[in-house]
Image (spheres, grey):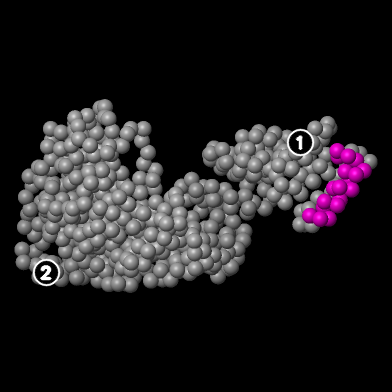
Amino acid sequence: MSLFSADPTEAAFVRFRAGDLVGAEEGFRNILAREPGQPDALHGMACLARARGQDATAIALVGLALQKNGIPPDRKARMHITLGLALIAQGHAEAARAALNVSVILQPSDPRAHAALGEAFERLGRRGEARAALEKAVALSADDTVVRTRLGALFLDDGLAEQAIGQFRKVVQHRPQDGHALANLGAALFVRNAFDEAVTVLSKACEQGARTAETLNSLGLVKMALGDLCAACETLQEALQLRPSDGRIANSLGTVLMEIGRLEEAEALFGAIVMRESGEEADRARFNRATILLGQGKFAEGWRDFESRRSLLRLVSDVPQWDGSTGEEPVAVVGEQGLGDEVQFLRFLTLAAKRRPLRLRLRAAALAELMPELDQGRILPAEGPVVAEVSLLSLPAVSGMDDVPSTEPYLAVSEKPEARRIGVCWSGNPSYRFDRRRSVPVGCLDALQQVRDVRFVALQPDDAPGWMERVSLETPMDLAREVGRCALVVSVDTLVAHVAGALGRPLWLLNREGGDWRWKDVDWYGGIRQFRPPSGAAVTAGWEAVLREVAQALSSRVW
């Protein structure tokens, strides 16, 4: 009998693949009793060790097998796969990569080698190479659903939702009744903001046996994005019952509880997460709790917790962080998040500039020139040396502010309000996950056409109805000047609303149900009137009701 004949080991490997570990071990041991050091049997014992979680033993056994000469390349390649996977499990990713690279060289057509190499690359943080290896494995696999699922998950983790959706769709095409495959696709669709399809796919996933905490969390967030807040709350409560200690699900439920006004329950959830967890979910809970506190005017606690967003956004810098101290060495003020956030927080530059010369590294920096109370001599060119930096949104925390903000305007333009000129902004950044609830469908604006003797001006450049005036809005300064010409601004919660408030122009805010912390119990601007959809209304129907109310209010307004 040849040393490398498949006959002595094939039956044992068949038993191993069938899950009969006892029978497989008996077969491999019988071979080794007759032929000590037989490499295929040693490899089989290594596979058994891996199946039992004994990866160090597996590494030793494969090492012994590979010492034998004359092993055919295909079998040697399989041994290197086992060795590589065991090394990965032991945390030796670079050694695993080397072993698996040998496997790929020996047997380039084996999809298992490429899939395992992809896992090694992923452990090494070489994610592009990991994706390439898994794509190769997919191309070589007869049944590629497992590898495609892994590849889709890698795409999703890397923020490549469109590519993830493509992989998960192919898995679902092959396994249309597989609840877990549907759940993966639904989760990716949610990340891509494809909410209508996501709710259908995730609901089907639940029907097909994947009614898990993970699936329900995704489904609850989709329902929240679609505006069905009560249904979202019920779904997320069920998810948390299935996995009570999951901080991510608790944060999701707390968020929807905030939206429907159950603030005490939400705050208790966030507090529990902070008490029992550390890391990202604890930071997310602190941030969520901050939005409750700030909305209620509890600024000392709120600004402290608000700083947790820095960890969530991974705001890291080689420059020391400014602690609010005074001096003449300049400090850089850097931007983060949206332009609306920057405009809201520009007000804090006045105090900061009294403590330090500032270099403004903000997208809204030009608007600081419109601040009458700001000592412009303390504003230095953006580029140049600094001794520290601070996020614009961190200024209240580092300055120790705990007072209610002034509602007095802090921007000023030379343009004067023109009678009956009404600026309208109906949508924000579509990439915002809950923009569907925040933005008004353009067709709902038709209700405004019944208002007579006014001029409607579009304060956004895209998709403006033909009956509105259009203006140039290429820069934030252009927007400030056009808002300055308005007698009234009607806007959703976005940059335009903050510019109107900062300029002191009357603002009618079209605010979604629940709404952001900036528009809660504390007034950041004067002259604001809020219009909200009826509680529980579908998105379009709710905004149609709001615009009818706005039209009636405009028609009866005394100018």
The quadrant the N terminus occupies is top right
Towards the viewer: 181 or 241: 241
Q: Between marks 2 and 1, how big is the CA–CA gap?
A: 85 Å
Q: Residue at x 62, y 61 (%)?
A: 175
Total count of labels: 2
| Dot 1: element | helix
Q: Residue 351: percent from the left, percent from the top?
A: 16, 42
Taking 203 as reference, is 51 above or below it? above
Residue 318 position (above or below residue 438):
above
Q: Along the horizontal axis of the image, is 143 left or right of 381?
A: right
SS label for mark 2? helix
Query: Where residue 317 is drawn, which disc sits there?
Result: none
Q: Is-magenta flag for residue 33?
A: yes
Marks 1 and 2: in contact by CB < 8 Å? no
Label 2 sits on residue = 555
Q: Is residue 462 visible?
A: no
| Residue plotted at (49% across, 68% down) | 241
Task: Locate residue 140, reporting x and y percent.
Answer: 67, 45
Tell me where the magenta segment starts and ends, as one range.
21-38
Residue for point 37% across, 64% down: 268
Mark 1 = which residue?
A: 63
Q: Identify which amino acid the numbered label 2 is placed on.
A: Ser
